[in-house]
Each structure stands twice: as structure tokens, then as C-alpha cells.
Image (cartoon, rainbow, N blue to C red):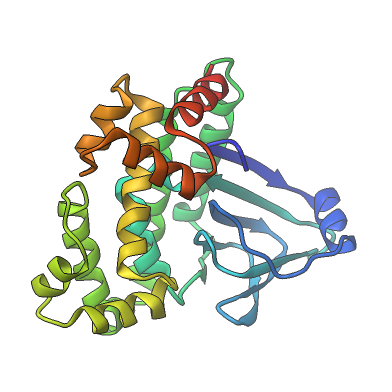
Amino acid sequence: MTETFKIFQVDAIEAKKIIASENEPHHHDFEELIIGTEGQLEHFIDFRSTVLRAPFVSFVTRGKVHRVKPIMKDGKCQMWAIRFKSEFIPETTFQLYSLYHDNASIELPVGACFERLSTLCEMMDEEMQQNLPDYAIIRQLLGAVFTMIASERRKLKPNEEEQLKSQNITFKNFLRILEENFRRSVGVEYYAEKLFMSARNLNNICHQILQQSVSEIIETRKLIEAKSLLSTTDKTISEIGFELGYNEKAYFTNVFKKKTGQTPSSFRTEMQKLIS
């Protein structure tokens, strides 16, 4: 996906096309939220297959292996698919990884909450249809969507919060400390010391949840912020690199190109073309 944000609907016609196509388990380089309003969805994720009945929501984090198969019910199928790059809401993305790890999907009751979710999707879709979409508005609306889902989830599963805390408390604390320090030139040992544990144990926890080492997660967070700054500010490449703890522009450029396949300058040019 080249766009930073994309929203579209899957109706009965599109569902039939997906069902008829070769639909193998896959992963992608963006985040995806699926909101089902009619029909059903067979979703293979977290190494198990589940059939969800609308209304439902399912969040697929970047890199997760999954497969979706829409299912008609009474001849109807209607779903919203929202796709966005991690840098679109950088301050929220890693918290989503933690919350939705091994808890990707949830069925919701019919009612005011779900109706409001549909309204927010319609508002985002309408904004994207404008000649010059205001992405600040879309960010706020997307944030509201996740806030409402989290609120409804707490009502439906009041014990889940405590279970998640006990299962992922170290990882969540790591993400909190990372959010406060990722701009600094500190490595694995710094975070392990803050968490009163060895670097090896912290790496093991991160591998279990995100299939990445601590160093990879730190670089990913820096990269997400770099993309955000390149897309939304006029700061120079050197200024952005220095702000993220890279003392040399050349080193920052090399790391960015290695991770993304393009230089910071070419990425900024591409984003400016997409936005304009």
C-alpha cells in the first residue's frame, strides 16, 4: 500500500470476488481495522480460525499472518476496511499492538455504540472524497473509533484488562518507557535496566509478542516518527535525524534506506505528491 490512509467498503459483490479468488494467508506492511455491519467474516489470525457475526471489529497489526473470508448472511454482506501506515498515528500504534496482541477480534452488540462507529467511518470516507482531504480530521476520527472500541470492549470483557496486564505488563512498561525515550541514543541495556531485568529476558518477551528484538522495535519506533516528521513538517533531513538520536545525516539516511528501500528525501517527495 502506497497511501498513508485508506478506507473502503466491502459489499456483497466485492465479497463474492474475494471468495472466488486465491486467498492464501498473508501479511502486509500496514495496520488494518475491519468493521462488519452485515454478514459474517471467517478470520484466520493468531494461528486459529474464527467466524465473526456482524456487528464485529477486527484489528490486524502490521506483519501478522492472517486471511479473511467474507460470508454472506441472508444475501447481505457489508464491512468497512480501514488501512493506515504506522506513522499515521505514531503515538497510538504501539499501544494498539499491545492491546490487540492475541485478541484481534470482538463481536459487538447492536446499539448506539456500533451505530456511532459506522457514522465515524462514513465521516472519514466523506473526508477522503474531498479534493484536499484534511488528514488531521481523519486522525481525530480514527482515534475516536479506537477509543470507542476500547470502551465497549471493557464493558463486554471486564476481566480482560487485568488478564492483559498480567500477561503483558513487562511489554507494556517497555512500550511506555520507549515512548518517552526513543528519541535518545540509548540501547537495549538502558531499557532492560529500567525494567529491572536482563537484556536477554526483555528480548525474549519482545520476540514472543512482536517477533522482533528490542533493537528492531526501537528502530521501528524511530522510523515511524521519522516518516511522520518527513510527511508533516518542513524540518531538514539532518534536523529530523538529530531529533531522533542520529548524530550524522549519512548514518540516518543509510538506516532509513535500509529499512524502507528509499532515502528520506525520496520518501518526503513521494508523500508530498500523494498529499497534493
Is 16 located above or below residue 139 in the figure?
Answer: below
Q: Is residue 140 visible?
A: no
Q: Which residue is rendered at x = 21% and y = 52% of the image? A: 182
Residue nearer the viewer, 67 or 185: 185
Asked whether residue 170 appears in the rendered view, the answer is yes
Query: At x 16% / y 57%, what residue is drawn?
Result: 186
* Residue displayed at 31% across by 64% down: 215
Res 261 quadrant in image: top right
Image quarter where the N terminus lies is top right
Residue 241 at x, y percent in the picture: 27, 36
Relative to 65, is 169 on the left or the right? Answer: left
- Figure disc tally: 0
Please, is residue 202 above or below residue 122 in the view? below
Q: Nearer the viewer, residue 73 or 10?
A: 10
Residue 220 in the image: above or below residue 48: above
Residue lying at the far right of the rendered structure: 20
Q: Position of residue 98 (x, y in %)?
A: 35, 68
Q: Where residue 234 sits in the image (x, y, percent)?
A: 32, 19
Residue 240: image x %, image y %? Answer: 27, 32
Q: Is residue 228 left or right of residue 266?
A: left
Which quadrant of the rendered structure holds the C terminus?
top right
Q: Is 215 above or below relative to 37?
A: below
- The residue drawn where x is 77% and y is 69% is 24
